[in-house]
Image (tube, helix red, strand yellow):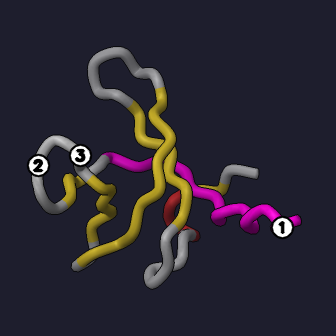
């Protein structure tokens, strides 16, 4: 269940809903908080990029191995 971003923990990776500023469609990504700003991995360059987040949810438990 999605929760308001204001309730997200600050020291763990979570799933973030990140709306596209042009289309309004949401992108879903794993993100973390760094110096008070939410960040996600950036595959086009080194480091990470700032995002405009609205909601979050905890990461799911990993699958069990057989």
The mark nearer the N terminus, 2 or 1, is: 2
Mark sitting earlier along the chain (1/3): 3
60 lies left or right of 35: right
Question: Which sits in the foreground, 41 or 3?
Answer: 41
In the figure, 58 relative to 19: above or below? Answer: below
Marks 2/3: CA–CA distance? 6 Å
Q: Secondary structure at mark 2?
A: loop
- Range shown magenta: 52-66
Instruction: Name the residue furthest right.
Output: 66
Q: Residue at x 23, y 50 (%)?
A: 42
Q: In the picture shown, does residue 42 fall above or below 37?
A: above
Q: Is residue 35 magenta?
A: no
Q: Is residue 56 magenta?
A: yes
State which mark lies toward you, 2 or 1.
1
For label 3, the residue is 43
Secondary element under disc 1, as helix, strand or loop, is: loop
Residue identified by numbered label 2:
45
Residue displayed at 72% across by 66% down = 62
Q: Position of residue 17 (x, y in %)?
A: 50, 44
Q: Residue placed at 34% from the left, 28% from the top?
A: 20
């Amino acid at each position: 269940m999605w929760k308001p971003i204001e309730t997200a923990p600050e020291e763990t990776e979570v799933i973030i809903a990140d709306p596209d500023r042009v289309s309004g469609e949401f992108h879903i990504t794993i993100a973390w908080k760094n110096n008070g700003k939410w960040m996600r991995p950036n595959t086009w360059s080194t480091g990470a990029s700032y995002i405009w987040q609205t909601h979050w949810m905890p990461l799911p438990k990993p699958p069990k191995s057989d």
